[in-house]
Image (spheres, rainbow, N blue to C red):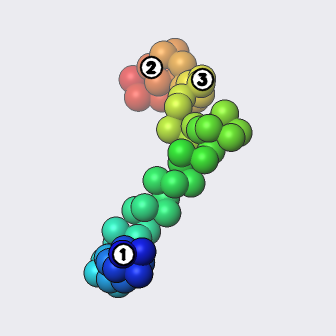
């Protein structure tokens, strides 16, 4: 029974498309970053203000 389970798992791994494997790896890495390191690359902590309203007005007026 355990051998059948291993064979099924190996067959499923063979049937995985390369895109699905890449997606799975990236998802695992993101989950690890969130859980272990408390880091989320998609969370915006602050916004960089590059151009003030006066700068835009002077440049494009």
Residue 44 visible to an observer of this rendering: yes
Say left or right for 15 vs 51: left
Vertical position of residue 11 compared to residue 31: above or below: below
Task: Name the residue beneath numbered marker 3.
Answer: 46
Task: Name the residue beneath numbered marker 2.
Answer: 57
Task: Name the residue beneath numbered marker 1.
Answer: 1
Q: Nearer the viewer, residue 59 or 16?
A: 16
Mark 1: few/some/many CA within 10 Å (<14, 14-19, 20+):
few
**Residue lying furthest front in this view?**
1
| Residue 9 percent across, percent down from the top left | 37, 75
Q: Residue at x 49, y 58 (%)?
A: 26
| Residue 42 percent across, percent down from the top left | 50, 38
Measure how far apart labels 3 and 2 are at the Cα level: 24 Å
Measure how far apart labels 2 and 1 are at the Cα level: 73 Å
Mark 2: few/some/many CA within 10 Å (<14, 14-19, 20+):
few
Q: Nearer the viewer, residue 11 or 39?
A: 11
Vertical position of residue 19 compared to residue 55: above or below: below
Q: Residue at x 59, y 38 (%)?
A: 34
**Residue lying furthest right in this view?**
37
Say left or right for 9 vs 54: left
Specify which label sits upstream in the sequence, 2 or 1. 1
Specify which label sits upstream in the sequence, 1 or 3. 1
Residue 13 visible to an observer of this rendering: no
| Residue 57 percent across, percent down from the top left | 44, 19
**Residue lying furthest top in this view?**
54
């Amino acid at each position: 029974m355990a051998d059948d389970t291993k064979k099924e798992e190996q067959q499923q791994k063979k049937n995985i498309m390369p895109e699905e494997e890449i997606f799975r790896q990236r998802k695992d890495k993101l989950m690890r970053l969130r859980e272990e390191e408390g880091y989320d690359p998609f969370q915006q902590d602050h916004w960089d203000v590059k151009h003030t309203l006066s700068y835009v007005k002077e440049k494009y007026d």
